[in-house]
Image: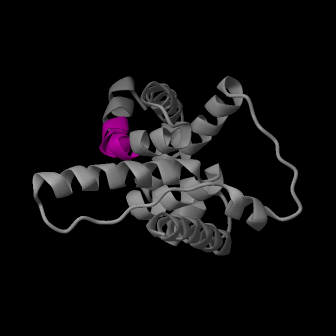
């Protein structure tokens, strides 16, 4: 395959998904500049791996590369915190979260409230453990189906469903806690 063919194939397979790639990288790293670094490295990896793409869902393929790149980047650039626990559910319930209420009228005041609520929801999502945050973002923000998420994250569909349910439950609990 010639360099020109590679460029064309890259443009068809990867470029349409750069927005989603950046969004996933940002959710995983938490910072604009880090997400940009991850996406740039992921694009290089995708370009080198073009010959290995045998067809199928190019979006899931691209996001898988972004996910792996983000984890590699995080392992290299961020100190890991290890917590040994007997009951992960108890640890999750003990972590503080913030929720969101939707404003219904488009007035300047409600728009300001909606922005603040969106910021609290974003902050709440950011506090989720990485595996839950990643699953929630891929499903509820990126719109991938369970099968695609399982493919991207390399876990069984049942695990995807469990992680998504747990992530949503934590967000709902947080919203309820904020209302009281």
Residue 15 position, x and y percent, is 33, 39
**Residue 10 visible in this rendered orientation of the protein:** yes
> On the image, which quarter does residue 14 sit in?
top left
Near-viewer residue (87 or 17) = 87
Most prominent secondary structure in the magenta stretch? helix
Start-end of magenta stretch: 9-20
Residue drawn 62% across and 30% down? 73
Question: Taking 46 as reference, is 177 above or below it?
Answer: below
Q: Which residue occupies 34% across, 32% down? A: 5
Check if residue 67 falls in the magenta segment: no
- Spot the residue most to the front: 180
**Horizontal placement of 22 versus 150: left or right?**
left
Question: Residue 78: percent from the left, percent from the top?
Answer: 67, 28
Q: Is residue 84 above or below residue 155?
A: above
Q: At 63% across and 67% down in the image, what residue appears?
A: 163
Vertical placement of residue 164 versus 84, above or below: below
Q: Is residue 17 magenta?
A: yes
- Choose between 146 and 177: the one closer to the eye: 177
> Which percent across, then down, holds residue 126?
53, 47
> Observer-nearest residue: 47 or 6?
47
């Amino acid at each position: 395959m010639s360099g020109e063919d590679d460029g064309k194939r890259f443009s068809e397979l990867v470029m349409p998904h750069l927005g989603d790639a950046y969004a996933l990288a940002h959710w995983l790293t938490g910072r604009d500049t880090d997400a940009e670094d991850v996406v740039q490295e992921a694009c290089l990896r995708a370009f080198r791996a073009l010959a290995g793409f045998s067809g199928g869902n190019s979006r899931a393929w691209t996001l898988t590369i972004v996910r792996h790149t983000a984890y590699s980047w995080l392992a290299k650039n961020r100190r890991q915190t290890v917590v040994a626990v007997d009951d992960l559910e108890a640890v999750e319930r003990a972590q503080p979260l913030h929720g969101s209420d939707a404003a219904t009228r488009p007035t300047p005041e409600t728009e300001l409230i909606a922005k603040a609520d969106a910021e609290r929801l974003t902050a709440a999502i950011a506090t989720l453990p990485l595996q839950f945050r990643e699953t929630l973002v891929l499903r509820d923000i990126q719109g991938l189906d369970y099968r695609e998420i399982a493919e991207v994250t390399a876990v069984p569909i049942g695990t995807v469903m469990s992680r998504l349910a747990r992530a949503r439950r934590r967000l709902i609990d947080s919203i309820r806690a904020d209302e009281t």
